[in-house]
Amino acid sequence: MAESSIEWTEATWNPTTGCTKISQGCKFCYAEVMHKRLQAMGVTKYSNDFRTVTCHPEVLNQPRKWKPSVIFVNSMSDLFHEDVPLHFIQQVFKVMNECPQHTFQVLTKRTERLAELSPLLNWTTNIWMGVSVENQDVDFRIDHLRQSDAVIKFLSLEPLIGPLIELNLRDIDWVIVGGESGRNPRPMQAKWVIDIRDQCEAARTAFFFKQWGGKNKKAAGRELNGRTYDGMPERHILI
């Protein structure tokens, strides 16, 4: 199993690799950096250029062999990228549908395509659907998420590069917040995080604070006002 160090999941599964940038949150894409590193190491799966979205049918059945886990789908790509054919997305969903022992977390920035394809997909209760929202300019993605048929819906506000005022959290089960990390991270202000936390509390939406980020994210930690926030949708708590 591909165990993950991401705080809000347990494992990763990448039936597609590669992506292209569509908004400011993509500027310092961690997946692009990791892709180049794996390519330099000679890992065959990452031999194509990062901007070439590649489907990997050979890994579709991996989750069937894993112990029950919380699995982040496509940490190195975007399942709803326009270069991923519908039939392949449906194959990915079929595996998720047939593995009820797992919880699958899918995250996209291509929310228009998510809303368009949602009626053509089988949304079993073990599939959590999330969208990335890095600033106010792309908060329309939340409305597209609401149009999907996913039972559990979540937001990844990472990297948070601007305030998100008066978020519409109707039907949103979970919110993850994180600052940008890497060589040239854009700063995240504490007041942005506190405001989002307060909005989540008012809406009774689970709140997870992932990290402050920065050049040394481990040193910066993930405490907010002296405590950690590890909220998850009530049906699933990471152990």
Image (cartoon, helix red, strand yellow):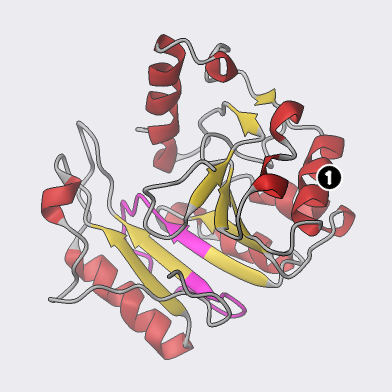
- Read off the residue under disc 1: 90
Residue 201: say if magenta. no
Type of the residue with mark 1? Gln
Residue 214 or residue 103, whichever sits in front: 103
Residue 219: x percent and y percent?
11, 51
Residue 18: x percent and y percent?
57, 26
Residue 165: say if magenta. yes
Q: Is residue 6 visible?
A: yes
Main SS category, magenta section: loop
Q: Quadrant of the C terminus?
A: bottom left
- Looking at the rendering, the stretch of residues picked out in magenta corresponds to 155-174
Residue 63: x percent and y percent?
67, 47
> Would you say 158 lies left or right of 174 here?
left
> Would you say 68 lies left or right of 76 here?
right
> Would you say 91 lies left or right of 44 here?
right
Which residue appears at 24% of the width and 73% of the height? Answer: 228
* Image height of 209 relative to 57, above or below: below
* Image height of 121 relative to 199, above or below: above
Q: How many marks?
A: 1
Residue 222: x percent and y percent?
22, 62
> Would you say 229 lies left or right of 48 here?
left
Q: Quadrant of residue 14?
A: top right
Residue 155 or residue 235, whichever sits in front: 235
Which residue appears at 75% of the width and 57% of the height? Answer: 99
Q: Quadrant of residue 67?
A: bottom right
* Image height of 7 relative to 83, above or below: below
* Image height of 47 relative to 102, above or below: above
Which residue appears at 51% of the width and 41% of the height? Answer: 2
Label 1 element class: helix
Residue 199 or residue 95, whichever sits in front: 95
Which residue appears at 76% of the width and 29% of the height? Answer: 57
